[in-house]
Image: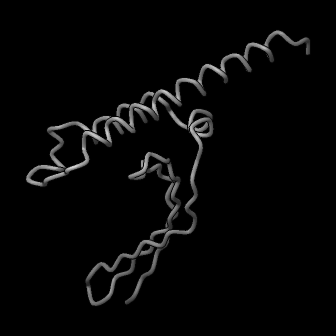
Amino acid sequence: MRTTRASSRPARLFLLMDGRLASVESVGTWRIVDQRLVADTTIVRACEVKPDEVIRESNLMFLLVFLRELLREKNPALEGQHVPDLAERRVRFDALVAGLGQAMAEHVVHLRRVGDSPA
């Protein structure tokens, strides 16, 4: 008996090496062949996203904490690996956070203007 299933995954956000943000959507399929699970993932869409888009569509605090955690010095995922540009990545990340802060400030001003306008 052969069973095949497909599932789409929500877009995931990635911090690229050069400090840009990318959104990646994928579809996963799996099937059982000879009592073994065979799984594949296919990227269906990938694009660069701007900081203001991230603010509108993401839980910002969760996002910042998650990304900063990836860049910490004692990250278990990096254990035993030499990452020569980790300090540079932290600097780029902090610059990105500053850009997000500016975009958030602009967004708040826009929301205030909308709130001040008569309906």
On screen, residue 117 above or below 77: above
Q: Nearer the viewer, residue 53 or 35?
A: 53
Q: Position of residue 68 (x, y in %)?
A: 32, 35
Q: Nearer the viewer, residue 100 or 36?
A: 100
Q: Nearer the viewer, residue 68 or 87?
A: 87
Question: On the rendered image, what quadrant is the C terminus found in?
Answer: top right
Q: Nearer the viewer, residue 58 or 37?
A: 58
In the image, taking residue 116 as reference, residue 110 lies left or right, namely left
The outermost residue toward the right is 119
On screen, residue 35 above or below 117: below
Q: How many marks?
A: 0
| Residue at 40% across, 76% down | 40
On screen, residue 41 above or below 82: below
| Residue at 8% across, 53% down | 80
| Residue at 59% across, 43% down | 50
Q: Position of residue 78 (x, y in %)?
A: 17, 50
The outermost residue toward the left is 80
Q: Position of residue 13 (x, y in %)?
A: 47, 49
On screen, residue 8 above or below 83: below
Q: Position of residue 8 (x, y in %)?
A: 52, 63
Q: Quadrant of residue 89?
A: top left
Question: On the rendered image, what quadrant is the N terminus found in?
Answer: bottom left
Its colouring scheme is one colour
